[in-house]
Amino acid sequence: MDNRPIGFFDSGLGGLTAVPYLMQALPKERIVYFGDTARTPYGSKAVQTIRSFSYQITDFLASKDVKMIVVPCNTVSSTCLEDLRARHPQIPILGIISPAARYVAENCTPENKVGIIGTKVTIASGAYYKKILKFNPRLDIYGTPCPAFVPLIEEGIIQNEIMDLTIQYYLDHFIGYNRIDTLVLGCTHYPLIRRNITKLYPDLTIVDPSEQVLTSIMDTLSATESFAEEPQGEHIFYASDLSENFLNMINRIFQSSEFAIAFKNLELEGLK
């Protein structure tokens, strides 16, 4: 048993979409979350910049004596996950891409047409493509970046015509031309517009990696015998910019929960 908290970090508020699955499945676990809201989005930044930011945040979470770090950010998972593991070899560090890729590989057949949407960096890395084909080389996989989604979501522009038009701009041709029937939301912000996508393309099967990462978390806790023995108190959510948008999104995601949550603003050393 290990009563230390589990660390989460994301380029902004998108990683919050993975947290409720853990809270519901493992209510005894305590979470320390960091959202780099002052420097979001990561998806259009240079890989070296993403790596530098990620080093800062994993160092911070390590200083909080976390027993595990979960990186629900697809951009970080696709570019520097192994670098983070090498920097903190004593802490299990889990990415979001492998569990989702395995789920797709196990649940799709060669008759399916799988689409991946994500940031420019995630799509350019080919991480989902490589991982899915490693598990199931018979699948047809297509990807397209949707860079405008994250800034709109961060601004709370979700349930309105602007977002719907943006979704159609990116996906109408992509889905129609490639005959996509299964769509992987390759950015943790994208579950926040899942209802929009389902409304516009009701026949799509949606795969949410924010949900699938729970399997990896539970497997790792089991393998290391690290489940919390008793409830550990409040969850703490840090942000590099504790903006109104960040607080509004937390309220949106956790509106039906009764969990004790504390919010703290933190500027990491060297933050620009």
Image (cartoon, helix red, strand yellow):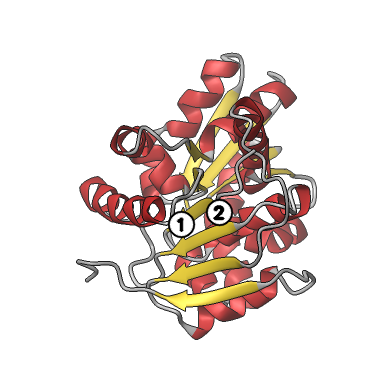
Front position in the image: 41 or 110: 41
Rendered location of residue 238, percent (x, y): 46, 69
Residue at screen point 63% across, 58% down = 17
User: What label does residue 141 carry, if any?
Assistant: none
Image position of 168 with respect to 125: above or below: below
Residue drawn at x 45%, y 79% is 242
Give the label, 1 or 2, closer to the camera.
1
Q: Residue at coordinates 53% horizontally, 40% vertically from top-left?
A: 96
User: Quadrant where the N terminus lies?
Assistant: top right
* Amino acid at the residue labelled 1: Asp
| SS assignment at label 2 | loop
| Category of crowding for the residue at label 1, using alpha-carbon neighbours closer than 10 angstroms: few (below 14), some (14–19), many (at least 20) | many
Whether 213 is drawn above or below 258: the answer is: above
Q: Which numbered tag is attached to residue 10?
A: 1
Residue 226 vertical placement versus 20 (above, below): above
Q: Which residue does the numbered mark 2 point to in the structure image? A: 188
Q: Is residue 200 visible?
A: yes
Report x, y in % for residue 265.
42, 77
Q: Quadrant of residue 175?
A: top right
